[in-house]
Amino acid sequence: MNRFTGPILVVAALVPRFAVGQVCVKQISVPKYVPIALAARVTGDVSLKISIGAQGEVASVVGSGPSRMLVEGAKENVRGWIFCAPMKKRSSRVRLRYIYRLEGIPVYRITVPKVVIDLGAGTITITSAPPKIEPD
């Protein structure tokens, strides 16, 4: 039996080959499954293109995906991230992929999610049980 069932959110960093070793993250805001998307059982992948400012701040972010709720949730989350300042003292760009998934048996109560951050692999996984929807 799978002990970790529920919504899963995975974030994968897609850093261009020439930028490897030049881009790093100082601070991450732990992402959450967007509550209204969770209740509506919305899933999908969100792609973000992030411009990092000279001080490591998120200067701008553009996203695309199957649901505006998920795109806005991912964009809101990444705006709280702080990257290491670019090596050349100018902005740089990073791509991130948020993967929103529901998995397992629905439950009535919301449980505390399990969060696994693996910067080596460039992923963040949030696992929780989805809410159970009462039949009419």
Image: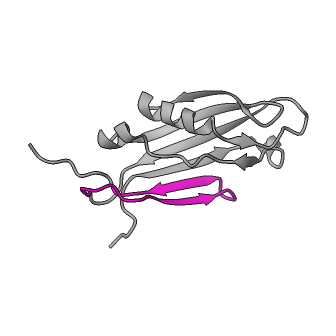
- The mark tally for this picture is 0
Which residue is situated farthest in the left direction here? 136
Q: Is residue 70 left or right of residue 47?
A: left
Q: Which residue is painted at 75% across and 48% down in the image?
A: 26
Q: Is residue 3 left or right of residue 72?
A: left
Q: Which residue is painted at 63% across and 34% down in the image?
A: 79
Magenta span includes 127: yes
Measured along the vertical axis of the image, is residue 114 above or below residue 99? below
Magenta span includes 120: yes
Which residue is situated farthest in the bottom direction here? 1
Q: Is residue 96 visible?
A: yes
x and y percentages locating residue 13 in the rendered image: 65, 46
Q: Is residue 122 left or right of residue 8?
A: right
x and y percentages locating residue 39 in the rendered image: 30, 42
Residue in front for this viewpoint, 28 or 105? 28
Q: Is residue 38 left or right of residue 65?
A: left
Q: Which residue is painted at 23% across and 52% down in the image?
A: 132
- The residue range painted magenta reads 107-129
Residue 91 occupies which quadrant of the picture?
top right
Q: Is residue 67 visible?
A: no
x and y percentages locating residue 67 in the rendered image: 41, 31
Colour basis: one colour
Q: Say which quadrant the C terminus sits in.
A: top left
Q: Say which quadrant the N terminus sits in.
A: bottom left
Which residue is situated farthest in the right direction here? 88
Measured along the vertical axis of the image, is residue 74 above or below residue 101? above
x and y percentages locating residue 87 in the rendered image: 89, 39
